[in-house]
Amino acid sequence: MSSNDQKTANGDGINWDQHAWLTLIREHDIKNILAHLEDNDDKQAHAAVTMCMLTGARLSEIPEITVTDCDEIVIPTHDDQSEDASTRRIRLIGEPLRQAKEALPNLPSPSDIQGVEKRLGELTEVLVARRKFKPTFAAMRHHVGSELLESRLDKDDIAYIMGHQSADGLEEYEQSQSKSNAKVPYIEPAHKEPTGNKGWANKKDSAPPPRPTFNQQSDEYQSFIESAHGFGFGAYLLCFGMAIAVTSFLFYFFIFLSVIDGLFWKIAAIAALSPLWVTALGYIAWFLWISIEFLVVFVYKEIRLFI
């Protein structure tokens, strides 16, 4: 077994064994290309090939793919036949979703995608020079469309997944080879009810309203962040002052106890002032809690925006 095959078998590479569309493009070629890209530390090309194989996105769409908190794959539609800017949302099920999220941080930028295409072309000329169907990005997308046509999916759903205005644009994915029982069980439109491998939602079901989005650059968001920071910092200062005050009180209280003669009078002083020192301990605990909450809620959440 070659080193590249061993890498795939050991799980270090991406396992494409169950990918339904590897018929015209050979499975071994895809594994070999991904292994070479990984060996060359070409993370951008590796991520782009992975995302194209999983979603069938156009080359120009790949750099702008995102994943929502609901694990929906959002793809901007770059259709030459439509001037309207739009996006499509698809759902990947199981292992493909993990692979897509793993590839997401390494996707090339729009300015780098042509370089990625060139490097892939140079690599395929070396690795699969004699193949009639070379695994270019266009061929990968064509394969996804072809296998979707052979699956049980409705053509309107296929058109949506592939970013076409209607099912009329699916003719380009038809191929002469006949396949039986071709299925793509892990990709579906996100506006349908989640189905996994148990079938598809009724086509007559109405799509739910789009999920609200939160613009982090909006004035409302910035005002909210400033108010939250002001409130948190004010509470922090208040607790800090209280902690200093009650700590000072406890310090002088114990000095006071040290100068009192007799155990009886010391116990009497502690009992008489018990509400005060219990309150003091409560303020210290409150200060510690607010400090931890401030660090976790405000600092951590702000850092997450840049991760």
Image (cartoon, rainbow, N blue to C red):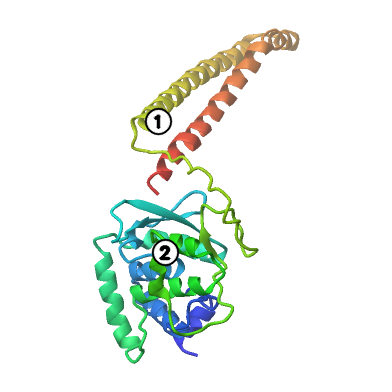
- In the rendered view, tell whether residue 306 sits above or below residue 136: above
Residue carrying label 2: 162
Residue at the far bottom in the pictured view: 130
Q: Amino acid at mark 2?
A: Met
- In the rendered view, tell whether residue 255 sits above or below residue 48: above
Residue carrying label 1: 225
Which is more toward the observer, 307 or 294? 307
The spot of residue 181 in percent (x, y) is 59, 78
Residue in the picture at 53% in, 48% down: 207
If you read the primary sequence from the N terminus, does the residue marked by circle 2 or circle 1 appear first? 2
- Mark 2 Cα-neighbour bin, 10 Å: few <14, some 14–19, many ≥20: many
The spot of residue 111 in percent (x, y) is 24, 61
The image quadrant of residue 52 is: bottom left
Q: Is residue 115 left or right of residue 54?
A: left
Q: Is residue 78 left or right of residue 160?
A: left
Query: At numbered mark 2, what does the secondary structure look like: helix, strand or loop?
Result: helix
